[in-house]
Amino acid sequence: MCVVTGGVLVLSGCSNSEDDAPDVAKVGGVDKVDTIAAQLPDKLKQSDKLVVGVNIPYQPNEYKDPSGKIVGFDVDLMDAVAATLGLKADYLESSFEKIIPLIQAGTYDVGMSSITDSKEREQSVDFTTYFKAGSQWAQQTGKPVDPENACGKKVAVQATTVQDTDEIPKRSEKCLAEGKPAIDKKSFDEQSAATTALVLGQVDAMSADSPVTAYGIKKSDGKIEAAGAVFDSAPYGWAIPKGSALGKALQAAVQHLIDNGKYLEIAKNWGVQEGAITKSVINGAES
């Protein structure tokens, strides 16, 4: 995932409606595990909260419900992990590009915003993996766009995502090398704005993380559809300071929830079980 600049559109109901959000009460009942909590850094052992930097909206992973509460798959899982550690997650909103610097500065304990664990990002922070997502394109229904041949097309992305920084630039370079027009990349500060641009026909396609594209399609009332299959799957990770013991504590908590079935329960509750993992690792970047 991620974020930078771009014109923000007026949101339509298709991309920002939360009236069918899951019943988060179904995933309660997580108890503290003392042996896992004992792995926390001393600072957090003496605290009752875990400060989490998050960028929203990025449905269904993190966004606000009609009451203004931050909800989503990532949120439910982090709440369960925090409970396992005997803490309460305290979510602070941030622009995406500031999350890692603020972790390095000690402002946040954890960065949680559907962050793809990459070799480049691992130079700045460590990651505890908790999910695996690929990229997927969407198009207006009945107006086919081939991701492998999108030269000259307008394609929406959320700024600073891997789609913005890596995927579309590489595809565009290939177009130019073949003597074709570059892809006209349109970057937006929020994914909901990118989705809205596609629904309104202001772009030809969009590229986003696979669970986000699937959610956008679901919420569009048939206005947009998948364009091609999921590709370039990679792990999501929670970002923590380099060398921090918090990474292993988070890993142990995630693995505990995987092993006891609570993790999969949360994933199924949000309909994202296809990206569920069976083993959490520290720094699992594949590229």
Image: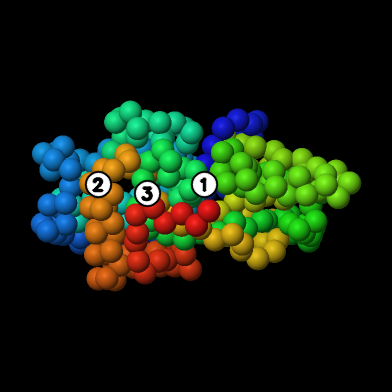
Q: Residue at x 86, y 50 (%)?
A: 178
Q: Secondary structure at mark 3?
A: strand
Q: Disc 2 marks which amino acid?
A: Leu
Q: Secondary structure at mark 2?
A: helix
Q: Is residue 19 visible?
A: no
Q: Determine the image quadrant of residue 221.
A: bottom right
Q: Secondary structure at mark 1?
A: loop
Asked if the residue at tag 1 contacts the one at tag 2, i.e. Cβ–Cβ closer than 8 Å, the answer is no
The residue to which callout 3 is attached is: 127
Q: Disc 3 marks which amino acid?
A: Phe
Which of disc 1 and disc 3 is earlier in sequence?
1
> Mark on residue 190?
none
Q: Where residue 30 sits: x, y (%)?
A: 20, 60
Q: Nearer the viewer, residue 91 or 67?
A: 91
The residue to which callout 1 is attached is: 1
| Other residues around mark 2 within 10 Å, as few (<14) / some (14–19) / many (≥20) | many
Q: Is residue 181 visible?
A: yes
Q: Disc 1 marks which amino acid?
A: Met
Instruction: Answer with left or right where residue 210 lies relative to residue 48.
Output: right
Which of disc 1 and disc 2 is earlier in sequence?
1
Q: Determine the image quadrant of residue 181.
A: top right
Instruction: Answer with left or right where residue 186 lies relative to residue 143.
Output: left
The residue to which callout 2 is attached is: 246
Which of disc 2 and disc 3 is earlier in sequence?
3
Q: Residue at x 26, y 43 (%)?
A: 244
Instruction: Answer with left or right where residue 187 lies relative to residue 150.
Output: left
Q: Nearer the viewer, residue 205 or 285?
A: 285
